[in-house]
């Protein structure tokens, strides 16, 4: 199917607010992970170039904090999904278990 027809059909497909919100969260998380990927590549280059350990440690800390932020953003998405799907108690409990296990 030509792209313009596909786009036209997609625009006619009803999308819930929750689906749009999830899509935005996914896009945000993927963007964060891509930035982190670049940070990690830069770290490897710094090590290869023999940069001072303190400089590398500072950049590692920044990458680690960025991963933490991406993780918490993912957990926020999980909790919002639970509330939007109407299973807020079970969903929040599930998200809490994940936080306790991995945070």
Image: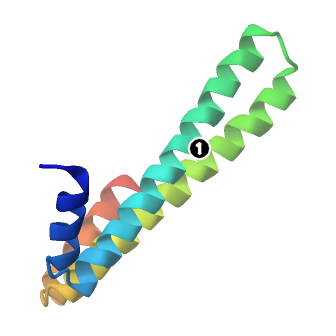
Question: Residue visible at 30% across and 81% down?
Answer: 80
Percent of width and height locating residue 2: 18, 49
Q: Is residue 28 left or right of residue 66?
A: left
* Coloring basis for residues: rainbow
Question: Residue visible at 76% across and 19% down?
Answer: 46
Residue bearing mark 1? 35
Question: Residue visible at 80% across and 10% down?
Answer: 49
Query: Label 1 neighbourhood size at 10 Å, few (<14), some (14-19), many (20+)?
Result: some
Q: Is residue 95 left or right of residue 102?
A: left
Q: Determine which quarter of the picture holds residue 94.
A: bottom left
Q: Determine which quarter of the picture holds residue 44.
A: top right
Q: Determine which quarter of the picture holds residue 100.
A: bottom left
Percent of width and height locating residue 56: 78, 28
Q: Up-down: is 70 above or below 43?
A: below
Q: Is residue 50 left or right of residue 78?
A: right
Q: Up-down: is 79 above or below 17?
A: above
Q: Up-down: is 91 above or below 29?
A: below
Q: Up-down: is 93 above or below 36?
A: below
Q: Report how many numbered discs are placed on residues in the image.
A: 1
On the question of residue 79 being in view, the answer is: no
Percent of width and height locating residue 69: 54, 59
Question: Residue visible at 60% across and 51% down?
Answer: 66
Q: Please, what secondary structure does the residue beneath circle 1 have?
A: helix
Percent of width and height locating residue 29: 44, 57
The C terminus - image quarter: bottom left
Q: Nearer the viewer, residue 45 or 31?
A: 31
On the question of residue 60 being in view, the answer is: yes
């Amino acid at each position: 199917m030509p792209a313009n027809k596909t786009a036209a059909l997609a625009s006619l497909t009803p999308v819930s607010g929750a689906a749009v919100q999830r899509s935005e969260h996914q896009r945000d998380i993927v963007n964060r992970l891509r930035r982190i990927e670049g940070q990690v590549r830069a770290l490897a280059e710094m090590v290869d170039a023999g940069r001072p350990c303190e400089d590398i440690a500072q950049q590692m800390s920044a990458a680690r904090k960025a991963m933490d932020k991406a993780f918490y953003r993912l957990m926020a998405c999980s909790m919002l999904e639970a509330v939007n799907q109407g299973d807020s108690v079970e969903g929040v409990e599930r998200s809490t278990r994940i936080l306790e296990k991995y945070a």
